[in-house]
Amino acid sequence: MFVIRFFHFLLGYVVFKAEGGFPERFINLCARAGIPVWDIKCRNGVLTGKTSVKGYRYVRVPARKSGMKVRVYRRVGVPFFLHRYRRRAGLLAGLCVFALFISVMSGMVWSVKVEGNVTVPDSEISEVLERLGVKPGIRAKSVKASEIERTALELLPRLQWLAVNVEGSTVTVEVRERVYGEEEEDYVRPHHIVASQDGVIEILEAYEGRAVLKIGSAVAKGDMIIRGITENKDGSVAFHHAKGYVAARVKEKLTAKAEKSIGVRRLTKTEYRLTLIILNIKIPPRAAKAEAGAELYESTRWLIAGGKRLPVGYIMHRSLFYEDTVRTYSDEEQQLIAVRNLLAQTSERFRYADIMSQTVKLVKETNGMTAIAEFTALRNIGQERPFSVREANGIEE
């Protein structure tokens, strides 16, 4: 229905009104003469309808035969619009230029979108695609997907798969990153499980191999806990990749320091500069450079319409100017900084351990404050250590 209405609007049509006479006879005579008439309505003896421009020239004959008086109510469509503004050459030229612009732009790439990447940044993929000619402003038909996919994978070794899809004025690049799994366990060469640090064993579970220590035993770093060698009843020896879980009560000490005074940079001034982007053309074309003593930051924004990124946007350049100065902290501030640094170390060090007890001490020094903490924690100290067959015979390598 929309296509038919658009077609009628493109060719133009006339909305007419007819009064008096016999409306049914009028409609029958129009149909018999092949005059296109549609959207006919009759209310209070007044007949309204639509017909083509050519059809209106012949509609008066059926109207005269049916005794109806026909008059034009409204003229709709492109021909009437052009006729109304026929003396305004600028408007007509603008419409022609606009139609040409739409025709040319519909065949060009407006935006390049990257999907499926997690660790590989968009900028790295977009840079490679631009080197291969895939960027806003090129003809969509010039994108050779198969060649670009093959070359891009060679230049992006962290990608396992890449597909280039041209959808109208948007190029969508779907990628899949390589998954680097952990190294496969060495099942060929047997392993012992030894202690990674000093402590007292609290939990000991041997899944494969033979435990040589018990719960409550004190161990030093490097001591064997689960042996990967077992003796059979017939006197033969079996080698295993020892597996198990060993949790021990360990003691550790952490220190964090806060300086009394440090050199800092103070922000003194901020300057902004704008660069317009239209079809990958930058206005002004000269690239922004950081001035002496300033840091330059850039952020790009694109115009979005209907969920699609248009090839129109801007780059905001922000220059930050600093001056060097010295910041001196009070005793209370030093304590807070030292404790904050200590908490950061603690969360990292004991991420996979349970803290059983802790003591914290603050020591004031000449040039600052030091926080000293002693912890008793429960952590997994089991560490795999490979061994050779010679070790089974009592010879350590």
Image (cartoon, rainbow, N blue to C red):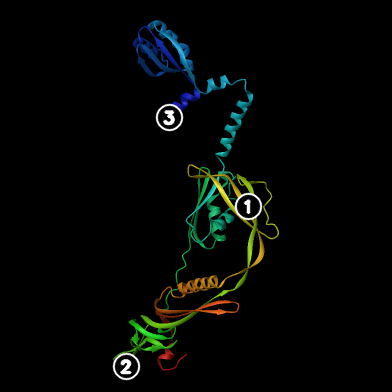
Q: Amino acid at mark 1?
A: His
Q: Secondary structure at mark 2?
A: loop
- The Cα atoms of the two marked residues, 1 and 3, are separated by 47 Å
Q: Is residue 3 above or below residue 48?
A: below
Q: Which tag is nearer the camera, tag 2 or tag 3?
A: 3
Identify residue type, mark 3.
Phe
Q: Is residue 241 visible?
A: no
Q: Are marks 2 and 3 in contact (CB under 8 Å)?
A: no
- Quarter of the figure that contains the N terminus: top left
x then y, percent, for residue 106: 55, 39
The local secondary structure at tag 1 comes to: strand
Badge 2: how crowded within 10 Å, few (<14), some, or many (20+)? few
Tag 2 residue:
235
Q: Which residue sits furthest bottom? A: 394
Q: Which mark, residue 2?
A: 3
Q: CA distance from mark 2 to mark 3?
A: 91 Å
Q: Residues within 10 Å of mark 1 (few under 14, many from 20)?
A: some
Q: Nearer the viewer, mark 1 or mark 3?
A: 1
Q: Nearer the viewer, residue 181 or 202?
A: 202
Residue 144, numbered circle: none
Distance Cα–Cα, label 1 vs label 2:
78 Å
Q: Which residue appears at 59% of the width and 29% of the height?
A: 95
Q: Quadrant location of residue 140? A: top right
What amino acid is found at the position of numbered circle 2 in the picture?
Gly
